[in-house]
Image (tube, rainbow, N blue to C red):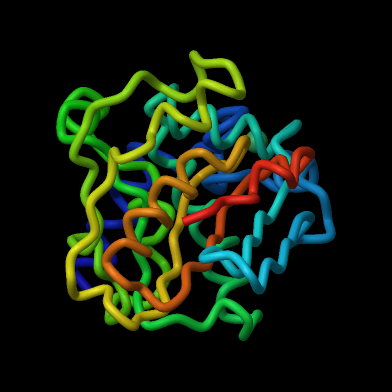
Amino acid sequence: MIQRLTQALVDFVYPKKCCLCSCIGDALCPDCRNGLPQDKLQISLILPFEIVTEVHSLFPFDGVAADLVKALKYGRTTAAADPMAKYLADHWHADVSLACDAIIPVPLHTSRLNSRGYNQSALLSDQLPDQLRRDEWLRRTRATPPQVELSRVERLTNLKGAFLADPEVKGKVILLIDDVRTSGGTVNACAEALKKADAAEVKVLTFCGNHEDPDSWAVSF
Ligand SMILES: [Zn+2]
């Protein structure tokens, strides 16, 4: 009872605002939410012959969806993570093809984690089942320039060898979570590390995706 009263007081003094337009109400107001494409899961790739067998991206990297990614990643608007994480969790629960043994958010290097203060992919994983979270199974061992500052070709090689997977991944089906997938360089580099440690399969779920270049998925190990 006291907890609810305290929360009501906090809400009164600091009312919840929309993370994009700042109107008072929800973390993502109905108007902004309506700007998202209504058909969730815009992009899905099934790649049975690759280490990455499934790639699901809920929205194209465009409009409100891209605004949410940028607000969370560059605007330090962590309030955006909550509604985004809910979309990811709803999709995961609804789609059995993303069944897995372990869920791992794409890790940041310690230096980036310290400067940003949080890992946006970890925040986006927070509404997925806790008992499957294994963040510690994948580490970023090398600091690299942000992907956004590089050309498409540079992005594909920038992260090569930048990740290290724990031997515990052996034989496991891993689900990687990230905010956005563009060239695929980040998840490919993670998948490469997981494969080296003998993971059975890697699936990918991202909030946004841009799969205009499916050739970038031809990863050979
Ligand atoms: Zn809004």
- Who's the residue at 83% across and 56% down the image? 38
Task: Give how far across and how far down residue 53 sits, in percent.
Answer: 60, 69
Task: For ligand 1, give the image quadrant.
Answer: top right
- Along the viewing direction, whichever of 15 and 68 lies nearer the viewer: 68
Decide if residue 171 is on the left or right side of residue 15.
Answer: left
- Who's the residue at 24% across and 27% down the image? 143
- Along the viewing direction, whichever of 154 and 203 lies nearer the viewer: 154
Decide if residue 32 is on the left or right side of residue 199.
Answer: right
- Who's the residue at 41% across and 72% down the image? 174
Task: Give how far across and how far down residue 188 sits, in percent.
Answer: 49, 48
Task: Give the answer, above or below, for where 157 lies relative to 149.
Answer: below
Q: Quadrant of the N terminus?
A: bottom left
- Along the viewing direction, whichever of 2 and 212 lies nearer the viewer: 212
When asked about the image quadrant of residue 5, the answer is bottom left
- Along the viewing direction, whichever of 175 and 167 lies nearer the viewer: 167
Task: Give the answer, above or below, for where 19 lies relative to 97.
Answer: above
When asked about the image quadrant of residue 135, the answer is bottom left
Task: Give the answer, above or below, for where 85 lies relative to 99.
Answer: above
Task: Give the answer, above or below, for where 37 lies relative to 202.
Answer: above
Task: Give how far across and how far down residue 122 sits, in percent.
Answer: 33, 52
Decide if residue 193 is on the left or right side of residue 181.
Answer: left
Task: Give how far across and how far down residue 136 sits, in percent.
Answer: 18, 61
- Who's the residue at 44% across and 60% down the image? 176
When asked about the image quadrant of residue 49, the answer is bottom right
